[in-house]
């Protein structure tokens, strides 16, 4: 396994030994016929090569991963995920703990910060040849873990299962009949940093800074950095600002003044659990990383930013005649 610096920065690409394609997961975006059609074509070509394929939809009401992981009689070599970034996020939450590489392709999805273009798998037979011949890379992306505890930091006994997120953990209230202002206290490594009054609080990975965090006026952080970003959502105080902290920190969030018990923990926009008065959510870097298969030979994070965020400079576009 060889480490390579990409674009002079710290994004790590690992070039692995040729992958074995004995057991493969194929997931398509639920309710999208185009994505499903692609999935069936890919499954057919894999089965012709002797692979055992597990195929199913992923969406708000469809979660195939527990069944796939429980029914696999041999190690899963690869997950082909066909959809948008939301489909890729769901795959990462379930597959990263199992160390399964993900080939995420933007078919029937939006934005596509995490996904390869559908052009990359137009000739899926060639893609399979590249995987079998070790002509691809795997990019590792930091993830977050969260767990609910009661009392102060000396009490490490968990009250919940462990939750995972690739983009962000979010603590904010949910109510079907009114907009609720949350009052949250945040600690970093046991030290109280601030109390926030507003719509909620985001704790993001660098990957997640181009998602909800960006919409909340947080910074864009290169995914090659080991860091977490704490961003208040619509705070009622102008002094409440985003904070970038080391990845090894533990962020504890306490709900205050919550008599209706509306505070929830969300993982990548999906409901994880409720947080009751006297409880806290401890959020930290996960011990595992999401692994994404990269097929593009000229992968550029900055080009992705330009394309997806439609960066065009000023209204008047000046020609640069000084570039060779």
Image (tube, rainbow, N blue to C red):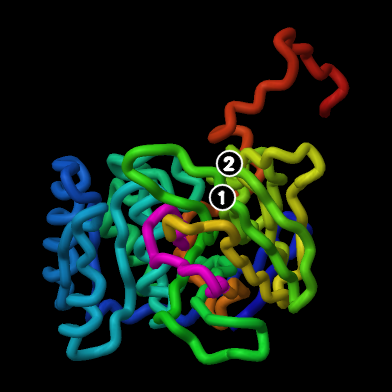
Residue 302 showing in the rendered view: yes
Residue at 45% x, 64% y is 293
Q: Crowdedness of circle 2 by 10 Å Cα count: few (<14), some, many (20+)?
A: some
Measuring from the top left, give residue 9's x and y in whole percent: 76, 60
For residue 3, side relative to residue 23 (left or right): right
Say which quarter of the image contains residue 236. top right
Measuring from the top left, give residue 242's x and y in whole percent: 74, 49
Q: Which residues are magenta?
A: 263-281
Assign the C terminus to one quadrant of the image: top right
- Which residue is at the front of the view, 2 or 56? 56
Q: What number is the disc on residue 182?
A: 1
Which residue is situated farthest in the top direction here? 316
Residue 46 part of the magenta-drawn span:
no
Which residue is situated farthest in the right direction here? 322
Residue at 30% x, 44% y is 107
Find disc 2 in the rendering and name its residue. 304
For residue 94, side relative to residue 25 (left or right): right
Query: Considering only vertical position in the picture, is 283 above or below 120?
Result: below
Residue 273 part of the magenta-drawn span:
yes
Measuring from the top left, give residue 217's x and y in whole percent: 67, 38
Query: Considering only vertical position in the picture, is 190 above or below 258?
Result: below
């Amino acid at each position: 396994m060889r480490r390579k610096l990409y674009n002079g920065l710290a994004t790590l690409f690992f070039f692995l030994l040729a992958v074995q394609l004995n057991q493969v997961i194929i997931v398509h975006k639920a309710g999208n016929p185009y994505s499903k059609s692609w999935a069936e074509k890919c499954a057919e070509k894999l089965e012709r090569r002797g692979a055992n394929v597990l195929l199913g939809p992923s969406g708000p009401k469809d979660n195939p991963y527990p069944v796939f992981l429980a029914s696999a009689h041999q190690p899963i070599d690869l997950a082909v995920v066909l959809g948008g970034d939301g489909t890729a996020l769901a795959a990462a939450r379930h597959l990263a703990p199992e160390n399964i590489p993900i080939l995420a392709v933007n078919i029937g999805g939006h934005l596509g910060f995490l996904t390869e273009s559908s052009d990359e798998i137009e000739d899926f037979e060639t893609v399979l040849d590249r995987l079998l011949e070790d002509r691809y890379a795997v990019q590792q992306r930091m993830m977050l873990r969260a767990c609910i505890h009661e009392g102060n930091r000396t009490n490490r006994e968990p009250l919940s299962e462990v939750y995972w997120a690739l983009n962000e953990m979010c603590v904010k209230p949910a109510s079907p009949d009114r907009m609720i202002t949350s009052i949250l206290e945040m600690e970093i490594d046991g030290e109280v940093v601030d109390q926030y009054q507003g719509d909620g609080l985001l704790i993001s990975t660098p990957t997640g800074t181009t998602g909800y965090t960006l919409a909340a006026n947080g910074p864009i952080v290169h995914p090659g950095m080991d860091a977490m970003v704490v961003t208040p959502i619509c705070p009622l105080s102008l002094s409440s600002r985003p904070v970038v902290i080391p990845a090894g920190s533990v962020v504890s969030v306490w709900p205050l003044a919550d008599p209706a018990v509306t505070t929830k923990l969300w993982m990548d926009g999906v409901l994880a659990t409720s947080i009751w008065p006297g409880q806290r959510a401890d959020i930290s870097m996960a011990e595992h990383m999401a692994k994404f298969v990269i097929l593009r030979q000229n992968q550029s994070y900055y080009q992705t930013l330009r394309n997806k965020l439609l960066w065009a400079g000023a209204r008047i576009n000046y020609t640069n005649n000084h570039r060779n």
